[in-house]
Amino acid sequence: MNFALYKEMLSVAPVRRLLLVGMIARIPHSAAGVLLTLHIVLTLGLGYAAAGAAAAVMTIGIAVGAPWRGRRVDTAGLRKALIPSVISETVIWSIVPHVSYEWILPLVFVGGLFTLPIFSVVRQSLGVMVDGEQRRSAFALDSIATELVFMIGPAVGAIVATAGFTVAGLTAVGVSVSVAGLFLIWFNPPTRSEDVCTPEEAADRAADDLAAAEAAVVASAPAHVQEAASEMASARGTRGGALRGRLARNFTWFTASVAALFAVAGGAGMVLSGTDVGIVALLERGGHETEIGIVFFFWCAASVVGGLIYGAMHRPVSPMLLLLGMAALTIPMGFARDTWTLALLSLLPGLLCAPVLSAASEKVADLVDEDRRGEAMGWYGSALTAGVALGAPLAGVFIDGIGPSGGFVAVGTAGVVLCVAGLALMKRRRAARV
């Protein structure tokens, strides 16, 4: 292991500044989950299934918006891409705490759609700034910074919510995220190397080549997944073949290996969000909601340690195996009956949290070319948030049905099943190649 890599990374001023800005920008949203959950449960008097459904709707919005936001970063540049987020964060989160549950759902969906894409921006920028073994260390540092955020945010959110200030807390979340977005616009970290052309430039070059050669088919032109990128129209002038041709070119980066990484991201999001809701439910129902920060501290501190160890390793570990371990070790958390037992049981799955996300991000950056990496990271974020959208209500249903322990068992078991199925498919593919 080479822990000196961390010193090397932190000695680079742009990397150090990006990690710091990214960490600060994530703090408000890390508190938002606990604030929204306790606002719905305590202030509105609804159950954890309803709170989980709201979290799911919000993360579906994030999942839908992430690829588009990532592509906007690729095409329009970071500063223009972040303007909608800076505006919407303040507006949406200032309204959410003042309306009924029925209005919360569409509002948090729109809020998710335009959420500040801090995760994908930081990872994309790090992918440009560093490469090789340094990239693993940089991604590990970002995961560690994220865990430090989750030591602070949920604890603050729980204190604010249990004090009866969920309305003020949720409003502060929106304002704080908008301010963080303004700092990110001012910092404007690089999202692509200088020698990589923009998608519009690539499209223009392809069009020029096509005209010069009078070719019948456009061979290559990067474009958004939702935009038309076409073959030349046939003699009948139809566009159907054109649309299909360009759409096929758009997904050339989406291989089976990348799909497996997206499945890992989804599974990790499911386990983490279900664990999050389970921790809040177990302590709130036991009358220890003010101690939520203790468990989050242990859980996230373990992740920091795991991230430090993984980032210093010379060889990567399969993200699927890491997720399998984390999911299996989450199940015993359901047997906790008090704050300190839950905190101790969170240590083992916590050790694998940062390594799972770091390993998967690193692999995506390795497999996808730089000119498509923003979009790929957007889809990666969508997979992660889709898992979050599934895990929160899944845990909530089991919590309302059989008690807080049900949430841990449900998401842990689902994660194990996903990994076993994924490993079996990978083994079958390798056998077929032989």
Image (tube, rainbow, N blue to C red):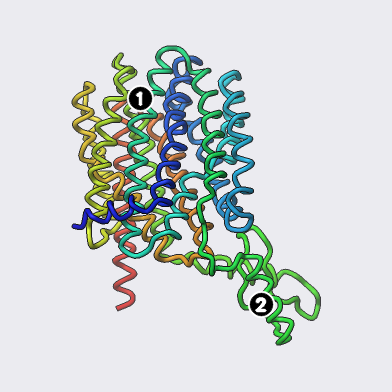
Question: To which quarter of the image does residue 300 belong?
Answer: top left
Q: Nearer the viewer, residue 29 or 414?
A: 29
Question: Residue 192: x and y, percent?
Answer: 52, 61
User: Please, what is the three-letter code of the amino acid marked with disc 1?
Assistant: Ala
Above or below — where is 208 with respect to 103? below
Tell me, yes or no, if residue 418 can be seen here: no
Residue occupying the point 61% across, 25% down: 103
Question: To which quarter of the image does residue 108 belong?
Answer: top right
For label 2, the SS is loop
Q: Is residue 10 left or right of residue 26?
A: left
Q: Is residue 370 left or right of residue 310?
A: right
Mark 2: few/some/many CA within 10 Å (<14, 14-19, 20+): many
Q: Nearer the viewer, residue 131 or 406?
A: 131
Question: Residue 386: x and y, percent?
Answer: 47, 44
| Residue at the spot of label 2 | 218
User: Please, what is the three-letter code of the amino acid marked with disc 2?
Assistant: Val
Quadrant housing the N terminus: bottom left
Q: Residue lying farthest bottom? A: 213
**Cα–Cα gap, marks 1 and 2:** 54 Å
Question: To which quarter of the image does residue 247 belong?
Answer: bottom right
| Residue at the spot of label 1 | 155
Q: Is residue 414 left or right of residue 174?
A: left
Residue occupying the point 27% across, 47% down: 307
Q: Which mark is residue 262?
A: none
Residue occupying the point 63% across, 29% down: 91
Q: Nearer the viewer, residue 314 or 213?
A: 314
Above or below — where is 248 with respect to 352? below
- Number of numbered discs overlaid on the protein picture: 2
Above or below — where is 242 with respect to 304? below
Tell me, yes or no, if residue 134 can be seen here: yes
